[in-house]
Image (cartoon, rainbow, N blue to C red):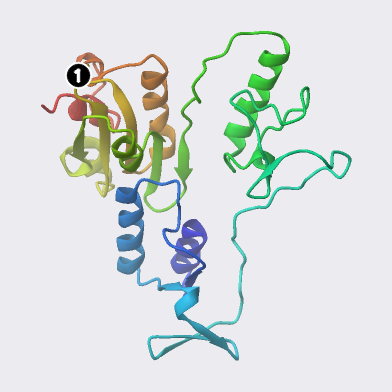
Amino acid sequence: MVELAQFFNMIGKEPIILADELPLMPSLDSYLESFIQKKLKKDKIPLIPIAEATIKDKSIVFKDKEYPFDMAINVSFRDAVLPETVPDITLEKGFIKTDRFHQSSIPGIYAAGDVNGKSYLAHVASAQALEVIDTIMKVELPREDRSYPLNIYSEPEMAQIGMTEEQIKAAGIDYKVNQYSLNANGKALAEGTSEGFIRILYETKYHEVLGVQMVSEHATDLISEAGILMELEGTTFDLARTIHAHPTVAEVYMDAGSIE
């Protein structure tokens, strides 16, 4: 919904986000959620909780102010399309409940993608489908769920991979956060795209990277470096020692990894 709201704002419309719940993106780190809400406010895009609003005659009334509208676009999360031929399959919150290997409650029946409710992202569905094939072919897979990038094609772009700060706290892990601003990145400054940052969350014993969050131009592309790093159980030391070309925006990985 953020992408659409910003798009209509860019072409001279006056979009309003009527949210049925907050945060807007429940799976997003609260730090990025806070950035989104501040950005919407800066762009003068109203964010209105539906429970606190009244809708009447093509207008929304919120805190004694009226917001007229001529069109409503539904950007709600998708529901699962369930197979009628398997009536006894176990569901969880309206989705097919699956184990780590995407097998349903009925042995031999697997559910990959939106239908299992774990993610609505196409690249996650593809990865799950490949894991189903590996499972059927008796290929050994990691016991833990794999990290996947969550991309938001906003302006600027946002991306995250791995654990959020809330998840790390809930797991009782001793951690630190290294944050580096794009205001200190030469290429971002030269291109006039220095709004943004990188956040690296890592555990304090070995400095293994647990999560990465980015706000920048092409953040949805740059996040892949973090994915490779985390797949190999990389550390902030690995980032600091990896020579990145200059000038590039990707240098922020090395710079953030060098922070003590």
Residue lying farthest to the right in this orientation:
85
Q: Residue at x 58, y 33 (%)?
A: 123
Number of marks present in the image shown:
1
Against 176, residue 135 (above or below) is: above
Q: Position of residue 15 (x, y in %)?
A: 48, 72
Q: Residues within 10 Å of mark 1 (few under 14, many from 20)?
A: few
Q: Is the C terminus in the top left, top right, bottom left or bottom right quadrant? A: top left
Q: Residue at x 45, y 53 (%)?
A: 25
Expressed as whole percent of the image width and height from the top left, the position of residue 193 reads 28, 47
Please state if 185 lies on the left or on the right of 85 as rendered: left
Pick the front one: 199 or 69: 199
60, above or below 198, in the image: below
Q: In the image, residue 186 lies at what x, y percent? A: 19, 36
| SS at circle 1 | loop
Q: Is residue 232 left or right of residue 19?
A: left
| Residue 13, visible in the rendered structure | no
Residue at image x 15%, y 24%?
A: 258
The answer to which image quadrant residue 239 occupies is top left
Residue 55 located left or right of residue 134:
left
Q: Is residue 128 left or right of residue 178?
A: right
Q: Nearer the viewer, residue 191 or 169?
A: 169
In the image, residue 101 above or below residue 18: above
Q: Check the image and report above or below for 243 versus 223.
A: above
Q: Amino acid at mark 1?
A: Lys
Which x, y percent locates residue 196?
27, 46
Can residue 5 be seen by looking at this rendering?
Answer: yes
In this figure, which residue is indicated by the disc labeled 1? 205
Residue at image x 52%, y 17%?
143
